[in-house]
Amino acid sequence: MKRRLIPALLALLLLLSCAPVSAAPQYCYDFALGNISELDYNGELFIGIRNQKLTTSTDFQNWTLRRDLPDVERCYWLGETCVAFGPGVTLTSSDGVHFTQMENNLPAAPVISSLCAGGRILAHVYDGEAIYGTFSTTDGIHWERIEDIPDGADMFYMNGQFVVCSGGYKRGIYISDDGVHFTRYELPGTDLYPNLCYYAGAYHIRLDPLYQLRSEDLLTWTRELCSDSNYYQMGSDSVFYENGDLLLAYTASGECLRYEDGFFVEIDSPLPYGGSYSYRLTEYGLLASLRDKNFFLADFETVTASHSRYFVYSLYYQDGYFHVIEGPLPFALVPSRFSRSKDGIHWEQIDTPVEKPSGMEASNGTHSLVSDYRTDQNSPLTGTLTYPDGETARVAYEPVYGDFIEAQGDPVSGLFLLKDDRSPDCYVSPDGITRYPCAYGVLGNGRILYRDENNVISIESADTLLPLITPSIRVKLNGEFLSFMTPPVVQNGSTLIPVRFLFERAGAKVSWDAGVTTIAYGGHAISFTENSTTATVDGLPLEMPLPAQLINGKTLVPLRFLSEHLGFAVDYDEAQHTALVTT
């Protein structure tokens, strides 16, 4: 991620109004604010680096410098673990306050650039002379040198893959699923500084103000005409909206582009041009924020409401109204204010705020889901399902980022939309349990705004989408459904489940060291590695029916084998397609 020097005002706007891309707190906003840089944010705590020392704040104004900790250079959230590192030393923390210090094998050289995405950190180091290379890690402690890529080239995470793009040394595009093993593809053209991005189901390379190259497979490229002058800017700071034949894009500068006949044409934008916009895309419309102004576009084409001087911290729905919590400009001695609206267009300021709900209630037409407020940040989110016959079931959600699960329902489609309070990621669910990370929002009336694994956005009907997201199997632990970020799968008659959430929820300790995962519970210990069927059970080698596998960034393991060797009981409810685990 390239460092961007931006004013404090824009920095705070980006931090508070931009809904970050990956589940779990994996986003680091890499900028300088005064002499505080490498700033990360986990929803409650700001963590920065000042003169290589960690510093923290809960209000973005008063900072505590951690002089008791060693020097570090970068800070990221890997899942729910804060990782700060520099050459030879790594600090880890589950709360951003209490850190454990460990040695790492990162070479003794400054970190020139880094990228955190997909549960992994990539760091390029260079001391100006001999030490020069790019290294990869999943924990910030054990670093592996990435071979056969152009060190120092631009690093990206797009289309669910790690991408290194170089127009000079070792010219080419290098793609990796795991962030370690890269495949090289030819980079067409002669530009030394190619602008590479991924959207609308294809890779794009900007050649000049008039032409671009487009490829869906990185092998075959076509040359296309682009009439706009800011095409190459579209990326993580832009937002796309598709409705039938209409595809609009808003760029970071506020331009509005319409996709026509294979390329984007700039059209009149309802947003003032200039500055650096951040966007929040909801099923109600588009919220665009610029410095001290917020614009609401209910139809994505017309500004239907605007607010000045305040930033939108939170948007929620309760008692027939949309409620907005707005905060003051940075360092202004002005309290937050509260506004509400029936339609998302006409807003009124209210003196006495409605208390934000501790949970969200929704119905998909057959049963309802009420989520609980999460008071213990170390525990998973929970909720209660109520069925038409009055029966209830408890659900524990694998933690993502915020305080509670927001639940929205669409009775026409029969689907729930699950999302985190402070995360942009949405999950379509047919049952309130199984989560599929593929949607921006349920639009209602059986129409779902859908994003597939290639980040291609389309609007699908429930009739076509529902069969694709019906769970193959669900899991109950001690009578409580588990909602995994990566759903369990069935292979060759065996159920594979994500290892960490289930076993830690059961009270086991799950650890990882040098590629070996170990689960300890009740005097038993099982160790295994990915892609191997051999496991060590209480010191003895045993064969698993299937190897441990990495799927969507999660390690999945055979449920029955590991559970029974740890002393758990496993049974199956065939009628409900549910695995029953009892400790």
Image (tube, rainbow, N blue to C red):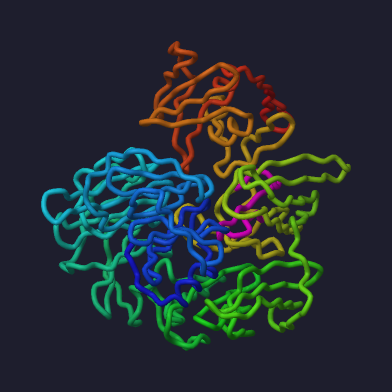
Q: Position of residue 151 (x, y in %)?
A: 20, 53
Please tell me whether residue 422 belongs to the stretch shown in magenta. yes
Q: Is residue 533 magenta?
A: no
For the residue pair 257 and 1, the one nearer the viewer reads as 1
Q: Residue at x 70, y 53 (%)?
A: 415
Q: Is residue 29 left or right of residue 19?
A: left
Which residue is painted at 11% across and 53% down in the image?
A: 129
Horizontally, residue 546 falls left or right of residue 206, namely right
The image quarter containing residue 274 is bottom left
Q: Is residue 67 visible?
A: yes
Q: Position of residue 379 (x, y in %)?
A: 64, 42
Residue 59 locus on image (x, y percent) = 56, 66
Percent x, y of residue 508: 58, 27
For residue 300, side relative to residue 453 (left or right): right
The part of the image, by quadrant, that contains residue 54 is bottom left
Q: Is residue 342 above or below residue 427?
A: below
Q: Which corner quadrant holds the C terminus?
A: top right
Considering depth in this image, is 27 or 485 the residue closer to the camera?
27
| Farthest top residue in view | 540
Please give the name of the residue rendered at 85% of the width and 40% of the height, measured from the top-left corner.
Answer: 391
Residue 49 versus residue 470 in the image, above or below: below
Q: Residue at x 60, y 80 (%)?
A: 333
- The residue stretch that appears in magenta: 417-435
The number of numbered discs placed on residues in the rendered structure image is 0
Whether residue 259 is visible here, answered yes or no, is no
